[in-house]
Structure formats: C-alpha cells, structure tokens
Image: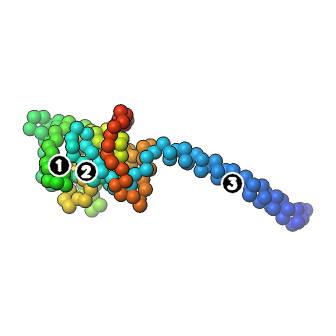
Amino acid sequence: MIRWQNCLAVFWLVYLIALLFLPIVTFAQEAQQQAVSSSKKLIGWTERVALSGTDLVLYGQMEPSTQSTMLHLQKGSLSLSERSKDEVSFELEDRFGAKHNFELPVVRKSRLRSPSGKTRQVYVVTLSFCLAGKFIEEEVILSERENIEHEIYIGRQALEGLFTIDPSQQFSSNPDCTEETIRKKK
C-alpha cells in the first residue's frame, strides 16, 4: 500500500518540474507568435482602400468574421451590361461626389441570405485593390444596399496571411501600393 506521504512527494516533484519547464514552453510559443505576426502588417478595423486603375479611395471595414469581400453599391446602380450578359456595370460615387463607372465580367452568380431569412441573387466579380501598401486581387460580391457607412467589407480570404487587425485603430495606413507583388485569388 502506497503511503500518502509518497504520493505527496511525487506530486510536489512533478509540480516543481512543471514550474521549471513552463517558462521555456511559454517563451517558445511567444517567439513563434512574433515570427508569424512580424510578417503581417498591422492595420486598423477601418482603413482606406484604393481601387486599382482608378483614383477612387473607399472606406473599408475589415471583416475577418466573413469569408468573402463585399462591395456595397447604392440601390439601382448595378445592372447587366448592354454589351454582354456576362458583364455587369455599376457606378460608385466617392465621398466628394465624383462618379466612377465600372464594367466588369461576372465570375459567377451567388445567393445571399439576409438575417431575416430572405435570399437574393448577387454577382461576383474579380476586383483589384490596394490596402495598406499591398495589392490584392480578389473575388468580390456586389451588393446593393442603402445607408452604408463603409463602401467595402474586406473578408478573411483577402486578409489572411497579410494583415493583423488592431480593433483600437482606424485609418492607420495609406493605400499606397508601390510593391510589385499582387496577391491573387487562389
């Protein structure tokens, strides 16, 4: 029969060994996290986003809880192109009232479900934009909405591996894309 004193001695021995090795394990985990996060750019939850090929700068909200990126358009500004049924045309207005017209090929049609349960058809296009000095080419859902505060929601597919979001920051970087690298949709 094992005495309780022996069990207590074994317990204290294991406890002391754990205390000795815990800082080493914690240090290794912190070092690994810093290595991963140092390759990512720190951005705020709201940033300026420049659409490639234009001088249009939108206010974007980082949405890591959603997979896809969504461009919000004013109601009635989206239509099928007159030239081709495989293209959509839409108009974006910047914060200064300047209007920009776009005509892009449709990658696919998709369905969105609202919180109330209603579904609606949306178009998906490929769009290139600049966020915090990085060019990103991503499939973007075109959604007609009213009373929008942020014109584009950047989903986790576009953010993944490039950015770390600091929710206490806003407009912490400029959309100056001088880098040659373009991250394309996989």
Per the model, the C-alpha gap separating discs 2 and 3 is: 46 Å
Circle 3 SS class: helix
The amino acid at mark 3 is Pro
Of badges 2 and 1, the one in the foreground is: 2
Q: Residue furthest bottom?
A: 4
Is residue 78 found left or right of 179 in the rendered image? left
Q: Which label sits on residue 40?
A: none
Q: Quadrant of the C terminus?
A: top left
Neighbourhood count class around disc 2 (C-alpha, 10 Å): few under 14, some 14–19, many 20 upward: many
- Spatial separation of the CA atoms under disc 1 and disc 3: 54 Å
- In the displayed structure, 112 sits above or below 186; it is below
- As displayed, is residue 4 above or below residue 154? below
Q: Quadrant of the N terminus?
A: bottom right
Whichever of labels 2 and 3 marks the residue nearer the N terminus, that label is 3
**Residue under label 1:** 92
Disc 2 on helix, strand or loop? strand
The residue indicated by pointer 3 is 23
Under mark 1, the amino acid is: Leu
Identify which residue is drawn at 60% across, 47% down: 31
Could you tell me residue 122's position as x and y percent? 22, 47
Of the numbered discs 2 and 1, the one sitting upstream in the chain is 2
Q: Position of residue 171 (x, y in %)?
A: 34, 55
Looking at this view, is 128 or 169 the one in front? 169
Identify the residue under disc 2: 58
Q: Nearer the viewer, residue 157 or 101?
A: 101
Q: How far apart are labels 2 and 1 at the CA level?
A: 10 Å
